[in-house]
Amino acid sequence: MNADDLERLVSLEMPFGKYKGRVIADLPGNYLTWFAREGFPAGEIGRLLALMHEIDHNGLKALLNPLRNRA
């Protein structure tokens, strides 16, 4: 993980599925948990979903707020 990954969480939209078009940082926790249980997709999107799951699971979503203001 690097600082760019955190910025991507608040700017990159989900490219598929039920929440297509929603920014990754805004995905509901139960959706992220589903991916954690079923398996994250390959590539960058999977890596970012896994990172967002960890942030959400540990109650750290507020740490992304300063980045949202810049995005």
Image: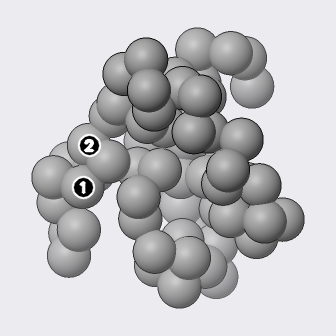
* Left or right of residue 59: residue 43: left
Instruction: Compare marks 2 and 1 and give the one earlier in the sequence.
Output: 2
Q: Are marks 2 and 1 in contact (CB under 8 Å)?
A: yes
Residue 23 visible in the shown view: yes
* Left or right of residue 58: residue 7: left
Separation of residues labelled 2 and 1 (CA atoms): 5 Å
Residue toward you, 68 or 29: 68
Please tell me whether residue 59 is drawn above or below residue 4 in the rendered image.
Answer: below
> Furthest residue to the right?
58
Residue ID for mark 1: 22
Residue toward you, 44 or 53: 53
The N terminus is located in which quarter? Answer: top right
Name the residue rendered at 35%, 30% in the picture. 11
Disc 2 residue crowd, few under 14, some 14–19, many 20+, Cα 10 Å: some
- Quarter where residue 56 is shown: bottom right
Residue ID for mark 2: 13
- Label 2 sits on what residue type? Glu
Name the residue rendered at 32%, 34% in the picture. 12
* Left or right of residue 50: residue 68: left
Residue 36 at x, y percent in the picture = 64, 72
Q: Determine the secondary structure under disc 1.
A: loop
Residue 18 at x, y percent in the picture = 20, 76
Please tell me whether residue 27 is drawn above or below residue 14 in the rendered image.
Answer: below
- Label 1 sits on what residue type? Arg
